[in-house]
Structures are given as C-alpha cells and as structure tokens.
Amino acid sequence: MSARRLRVGIVFGGQSVEHEISILSARNVLAALDRQKFEPVLIGIDKSGRWLTQDPQKLLASVQDPRLVSVAPGIPIQLAAPLTAHTISALTNTAPIDVLFPVLHGTFGEDGSIQGLFEVAGIPYVGAGVIGSAIGMDKDVMKRLLRDAGIPCARFLTLRRARFEADPADALDTLAALGFPLFIKPVSSGSSVGIAKVEDGAALPAAVQHAFQFDTKVIAEVAIDGREIELAVLGGAPPAVTLAGEIIVRHRDGFYSYDAKYIDKDSAQIEIPARLTPEEQSRAQVLALRAFEVLECDGMARVDMFLRSDGELLVNEINTIPGFTDISMYPKLWAASGLNATELITRLIELALDRGRRRALIRHSFDSE
C-alpha cells in the first residue's frame, strides 16, 4: 500500500499591497508541488480578509500579470475557535491538513501575524517563525539589528507619522541631513510599493507623504552606488546558501521598482550567477548566512545586498517569504545552484515538518518538585 500523500494548505492573497504578487507566487508553488507526495488544499484570502476555498485548476490557468489576477470567488471559510489543523480541514471539506505553506507577501502574511495564528493552532508551516517574520518585515528594526551586529548597511533614519505631523519642516530637515540622493520607503511594505528615489530636497515632502500612505513609519536610506546582488538561503542545520545573482536595472524609475519588476519586464536584466570573483562570492555567502542568523530567520529567505566599486558589501534587506513568480530570484537562484522548483518546494515542506516535530517536544507546563 502506498503512503498517504501529505496535505499541504497553500495560503495566498491577503490584505496587502502585494496581494496580486502573492497570487502569482502561489500559482508557481502549486505548479511545482510534487503531486506524488503532496495533495494541495488552496486557501485564498481576499482583500476584505475573507478566507475562501480555491480551485487548483483555475489558479494554474491564471495569467502572469499582477494587473489581471485576483482571489476567485469560493466557498467562505468561517474560522472557528479554537483554530486547529482539524478545524481548518473540516471547514475546507478536506481530510486533516498536515502543513501550511503561506505564500502571503507583506502585511498580515509576512510580518508574523499569520505565523502566530499557525503557532496557536499547532500547525507546522513553511518559512520563518513569528519573531523572524516580524523582524524581516520591519526595515527599521531589521537595520538596527544588522547595524548592532556589525553587519554593514546603508546609513538610515526612521520617521514616525506622529513626529512628521507635529513638525513636518523639522522632520524633513532631519532626513535631508543624511544627504542626497535618498530612498524613502514605507517600513513594512514590499515589492518596492511606496518607494521613491529622491534626488533633492524639493522632492522629499511628496515622497514622504506617499510612503506614509502605506505605513505609520517611514525609513530614509542613503542611496548606495553599487551593484544589486541577491542570494537565497534555505534553512536547516546548518542553512545552505546559493551562488549570488545580480539585477541590472535600466528602468526610468532609476531602481528596481514595482513596474520594473512586474510590469515593464524588459527594463531589468537578471544575471545568474553574478560576475563576481571567488573572493567576492565567498564574502557574499558568508554575509548572507550571518544576516539570516542575526535576524532570527528560518526555512527560507532572500538576502539583498549592494556591492560597491571598492569591494564593500552592504546588506540592503532580507525577505522571509520571497517571491515565487516567473521572474523571482529565489527559485531562480536555487535552480542555478542545483535545486529545481519541485525539489525546492519539497525541501521547504520537509523543513517545516521537522521544525513542527521539534517544537512539539517543548514543554508548556511545569510541575514543581
């Protein structure tokens, strides 16, 4: 008798500005899933927060344009309390779900929120835990931890909405003191949403106002003149890291913006592996693994860096639920390093199940002797 296939709940969509990118990523995760080992259970979260069962065939047939995709109408899932693997399974009309694969980029999906829900429910899940997810999503906290660990990153300042509203002129003067050009970013947004490159003080107020549409904290970073280098990390004991890849951007925005990534795909070129010396490659890999450790990551992460002309490497950020779209670097880097998409998805699920087994051994009660 053949072994039962494990049921994998793929959760995607979500209440985030990266909703559409999440759908594109989920489509590719589903397409790469080894159907000999795993049975998919699709759970789409629409922009109003409703959990809906989804049809695998419809998702696979969806287009690869973020402007034309959405979570399909499905049977609403009325979440019960207490939430467990069995209650989710019953609500989706399936047998017990063995592991969850969140493909939720951005707010309420990549920031520790849903990871906390899965922890309380006692369901193994792919990717970083609550603390690693929260750190990875908050660029301010992330960069403070990197800086305090001695990992080089760009000079930055953080601005909270209350400070800006109390004295806009003083707040803008403080940011401008970093020097131009600057990047202005919402602290907890991804896919380059809300980001602007600011060349002078005249453009700073509009960029800050725009970023505050997506978050209550904004970060200003000194623009680094360097090559954009990315590496993929796969958790484990010890974690593994790929060769580096490079993104060469020729878009009118002047950086790897949302349009450059997903709309005008001819404006950016990806080189895998990046043209690095063996010494540069080694330093980048060591730095990626160090950042993965310092930021409490697990499962998977993409580490983005800059390589300056003087050879200095600076960590830009870490992404704890990297994209799985057709142009995403994370699966491309692993493919170039010898792990195809199906093998990668399988390994991520295996790591999630292993962590679930280890966490199940932790005691949650204490009897004094």
Image (cartoon, rainbow, N blue to C red):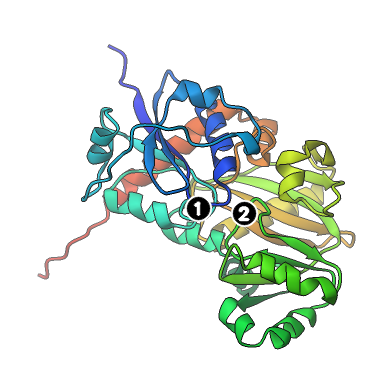
Q: Is residue 297 left or right of residue 120?
A: right
Q: Position of residue 223 (x, y in %)?
A: 81, 66
Other-residue count near label 1 (Cα within 10 Å), few / some / many at <14 / 14–19 / ≥20: many
Residue at point 58% right, 48% down? Answer: 18
Q: Position of residue 212 (x, y in %)?
A: 62, 68
- Vertical arrangement, residue 35 with respect to residue 290, above or below: above
Residue 88's disc is none
- Vertical arrangement, residue 257 with respect to residue 210, above or below: above
Badge 2 vs badge 1, beta-carbon distance below 8 Å:
yes
Other-residue count near label 2 (Cα within 10 Å), few / some / many at <14 / 14–19 / ≥20: many
As rendered, which of 181 and 362 lies closer to the eye?
Answer: 181
As rendered, which of 357 and 260 lies closer to the eye?
Answer: 260
Quadrant where the N terminus is found in the figure: top left
The amino acid at mark 2 is Gly
Q: Position of residue 6 (x, y in %)?
A: 35, 27
The amino acid at mark 1 is Glu
Q: Is residue 100 left or right of residue 158?
A: left
User: Which residue is most to the top?
Assistant: 1
In which quadrant of the rendered view does residue 295 lie? bottom right
Q: Is residue 129 left or right of residue 83?
A: right
Quadrant where the C terminus is found in the figure: bottom left
Residue at point 28% right, 39% down? Answer: 88
- Element under disc 2: loop
Marks 2/1: CA distance? 10 Å
Residue 110's disc is 1
Q: Position of residue 176 (x, y in %)?
A: 79, 80
Residue at point 56% right, 64% down? Answer: 138
User: Which residue is most to the right?
Assistant: 309
**Upstream in the sequence, badge 2 or badge 1?**
1
Confirm whether residue 330 shows in the render. Answer: yes
Residue 190's disc is 2
